[in-house]
Protein backbone atom coordinates (compact mmCIF):
# COMPACT_ATOMS: atom_id res chain seq x y z
CA UNK A 1 0.00 0.00 0.00
CA UNK A 2 2.89 2.35 0.76
CA UNK A 3 4.21 1.83 -2.77
CA UNK A 4 0.79 2.77 -4.21
CA UNK A 5 0.64 5.99 -2.16
CA UNK A 6 4.22 6.98 -3.04
CA UNK A 7 3.61 6.43 -6.77
CA UNK A 8 0.33 8.37 -6.57
CA UNK A 9 1.88 11.35 -4.77
CA UNK A 10 5.01 11.46 -6.95
CA UNK A 11 2.99 11.16 -10.17
CA UNK A 12 0.62 13.97 -9.19
CA UNK A 13 3.50 16.15 -7.94
CA UNK A 14 5.61 15.77 -11.09
CA UNK A 15 2.61 16.36 -13.34
CA UNK A 16 1.51 19.50 -11.48
CA UNK A 17 5.06 20.84 -11.21
CA UNK A 18 5.73 20.49 -14.94
CA UNK A 19 2.34 22.11 -15.72
CA UNK A 20 3.29 24.99 -13.39
CA UNK A 21 6.54 25.49 -15.31
CA UNK A 22 4.74 25.37 -18.69
CA UNK A 23 2.14 27.90 -17.54
CA UNK A 24 4.79 30.27 -16.20
CA UNK A 25 7.33 30.00 -19.02
CA UNK A 26 5.06 29.77 -22.07
CA UNK A 27 2.14 31.71 -23.50
CA UNK A 28 -1.03 29.75 -24.23
CA UNK A 29 -0.85 28.55 -27.84
CA UNK A 30 2.96 28.81 -27.95
CA UNK A 31 4.78 25.86 -29.48
CA UNK A 32 8.48 25.14 -29.01
CA UNK A 33 9.97 22.59 -31.41
CA UNK A 34 12.12 20.04 -29.60
CA UNK A 35 12.40 17.77 -32.64
CA UNK A 36 10.91 19.89 -35.44
CA UNK A 37 7.94 18.25 -37.11
CA UNK A 38 7.97 15.34 -34.65
CA UNK A 39 7.82 16.60 -31.05
CA UNK A 40 6.98 20.07 -29.75
CA UNK A 41 6.07 21.54 -26.39
CA UNK A 42 2.74 23.23 -27.12
CA UNK A 43 0.85 24.92 -24.30
CA UNK A 44 -2.92 24.55 -24.57
CA UNK A 45 -5.80 24.43 -22.12
CA UNK A 46 -8.20 21.57 -22.83
CA UNK A 47 -11.78 22.21 -21.63
CA UNK A 48 -12.84 18.59 -22.23
CA UNK A 49 -11.62 15.04 -21.96
CA UNK A 50 -9.44 13.17 -24.45
CA UNK A 51 -9.35 15.00 -27.78
CA UNK A 52 -11.45 17.81 -26.29
CA UNK A 53 -14.58 15.62 -26.07
CA UNK A 54 -17.38 16.91 -23.83
CA UNK A 55 -15.80 20.37 -23.63
CA UNK A 56 -17.11 22.46 -20.77
CA UNK A 57 -18.38 19.51 -18.72
CA UNK A 58 -15.86 20.23 -15.95
CA UNK A 59 -18.03 19.16 -13.02
CA UNK A 60 -18.99 15.95 -14.78
CA UNK A 61 -15.28 15.05 -15.02
CA UNK A 62 -14.65 16.17 -11.44
CA UNK A 63 -17.47 13.87 -10.29
CA UNK A 64 -16.27 10.87 -12.31
CA UNK A 65 -12.69 11.34 -11.10
CA UNK A 66 -13.83 11.69 -7.50
CA UNK A 67 -15.84 8.45 -7.81
CA UNK A 68 -12.82 6.59 -9.20
CA UNK A 69 -10.58 7.87 -6.41
CA UNK A 70 -13.18 7.04 -3.74
CA UNK A 71 -13.49 3.57 -5.29
CA UNK A 72 -9.74 3.11 -4.96
CA UNK A 73 -9.81 4.31 -1.36
CA UNK A 74 -12.63 1.91 -0.51
CA UNK A 75 -10.67 -0.91 -2.17
CA UNK A 76 -7.55 -0.28 -0.10
CA UNK A 77 -7.56 -3.83 1.33
CA UNK A 78 -7.55 -5.33 -2.15
CA UNK A 79 -4.86 -2.90 -3.31
CA UNK A 80 -2.78 -3.79 -0.26
CA UNK A 81 -2.99 -7.51 -1.13
CA UNK A 82 -2.22 -6.97 -4.81
CA UNK A 83 1.30 -7.39 -6.14
CA UNK A 84 3.86 -4.65 -6.78
CA UNK A 85 2.86 -4.27 -10.44
CA UNK A 86 -0.69 -3.38 -9.40
CA UNK A 87 0.63 -0.93 -6.81
CA UNK A 88 2.60 0.84 -9.54
CA UNK A 89 -0.25 0.66 -12.05
CA UNK A 90 -2.96 1.92 -9.73
CA UNK A 91 -0.63 4.57 -8.31
CA UNK A 92 0.01 5.88 -11.83
CA UNK A 93 -3.71 5.91 -12.68
CA UNK A 94 -4.66 7.60 -9.40
CA UNK A 95 -1.77 10.09 -9.58
CA UNK A 96 -2.66 11.04 -13.13
CA UNK A 97 -6.31 11.39 -12.16
CA UNK A 98 -5.37 13.67 -9.25
CA UNK A 99 -3.14 15.81 -11.49
CA UNK A 100 -5.93 16.40 -14.00
CA UNK A 101 -8.51 16.80 -11.21
CA UNK A 102 -6.50 19.64 -9.66
CA UNK A 103 -6.40 21.36 -13.08
CA UNK A 104 -10.15 21.00 -13.55
CA UNK A 105 -10.91 22.41 -10.11
CA UNK A 106 -8.39 25.29 -10.35
CA UNK A 107 -8.77 26.28 -14.00
CA UNK A 108 -11.88 24.39 -15.26
CA UNK A 109 -9.51 23.08 -17.96
CA UNK A 110 -6.61 20.65 -18.15
CA UNK A 111 -3.14 21.95 -19.02
CA UNK A 112 -1.68 20.01 -21.97
CA UNK A 113 1.75 20.44 -23.55
CA UNK A 114 3.16 17.21 -25.07
CA UNK A 115 2.68 17.52 -28.83
CA UNK A 116 3.78 14.73 -31.16
CA UNK A 117 2.04 16.37 -34.14
CA UNK A 118 0.20 13.15 -35.12
CA UNK A 119 -1.86 12.99 -31.93
CA UNK A 120 -3.76 15.59 -29.91
CA UNK A 121 -1.69 17.47 -27.32
CA UNK A 122 -1.66 15.74 -23.91
CA UNK A 123 0.16 15.89 -20.55
CA UNK A 124 2.10 13.75 -18.07
CA UNK A 125 -1.07 12.85 -16.12
CA UNK A 126 -2.59 11.40 -19.31
CA UNK A 127 0.65 9.49 -19.90
CA UNK A 128 0.64 8.08 -16.36
CA UNK A 129 -2.99 6.98 -16.71
CA UNK A 130 -2.29 5.21 -20.01
CA UNK A 131 0.84 3.50 -18.69
CA UNK A 132 -1.04 2.43 -15.55
CA UNK A 133 -3.93 0.97 -17.55
CA UNK A 134 -1.43 -0.75 -19.84
CA UNK A 135 0.29 -2.36 -16.83
CA UNK A 136 -3.08 -3.54 -15.48
CA UNK A 137 -3.93 -5.10 -18.85
CA UNK A 138 -0.46 -6.70 -19.07
CA UNK A 139 -0.84 -8.21 -15.63
CA UNK A 140 -4.36 -9.44 -16.43
CA UNK A 141 -3.09 -11.03 -19.65
CA UNK A 142 -0.23 -12.72 -17.77
CA UNK A 143 -2.66 -14.02 -15.16
CA UNK A 144 -5.00 -15.30 -17.87
CA UNK A 145 -2.13 -17.18 -19.56
CA UNK A 146 -1.02 -18.62 -16.22
CA UNK A 147 -4.53 -19.94 -15.48
CA UNK A 148 -4.91 -21.40 -18.99
CA UNK A 149 -1.41 -22.81 -19.13
Image (cartoon, rainbow, N blue to C red):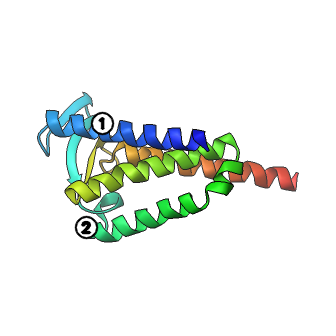
Residue 112 can be seen in this image: yes
Residue at 59%, 39% in the rendered image: 3
List the residue tagged with mark 1.
Answer: 17
Q: Judge whether 91 appears above or below 48 on screen.
A: above
- Name the spot of residue 70 as percent of width and height, x first: 49, 63
Which of discs 2 and 1 lies nearer the camera? The answer is 1
Q: Hey, which quadrant is residue 12 in on the image?
A: top left
Taking depth in this image into account, of 118 and 103 the one nearest to the observer is: 103
Q: Secondary structure at mark 1?
A: helix
List the residue tagged with mark 2.
Answer: 55
Left or right? Give the position of 16 relative to 33. Answer: right
Q: Judge whether 10 appears above or below 61 on screen.
A: above
Residue at 64%, 47% in the rendered image: 86
Residue 88 can be seen in this image: no
- Name the spot of residue 8 as percent of width and height, x first: 48, 44
- Name the spot of residue 60 as percent of width and height, x first: 33, 71
Residue at 57%, 46% in the rendered image: 89
Quarter of the image containing the N terminus? top right
Q: CA distance from mark 2 to mark 1?
A: 24 Å
Taking depth in this image into account, of 77 and 50 the one nearest to the observer is: 77
Q: Earlier in the sequence, mark 2 or mark 1?
A: 1
- Name the spot of residue 43 as percent of width and height, x first: 20, 43
For label 1, count other residues whose C-alpha is less than 10 Å away and answer few (under 14), some (14-19) or many (20+).
few
Residue at 31%, 52% in the rendered image: 102
- Residue lying at the far right of the rendered structure: 149
- Residue lying at the far left of the rendered structure: 27
Amino acid sequence: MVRFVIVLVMTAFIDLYVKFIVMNKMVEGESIPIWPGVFHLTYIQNPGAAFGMLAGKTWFFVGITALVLVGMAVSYRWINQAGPLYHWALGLVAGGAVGNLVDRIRYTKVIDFLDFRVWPVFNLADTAICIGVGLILLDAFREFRREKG
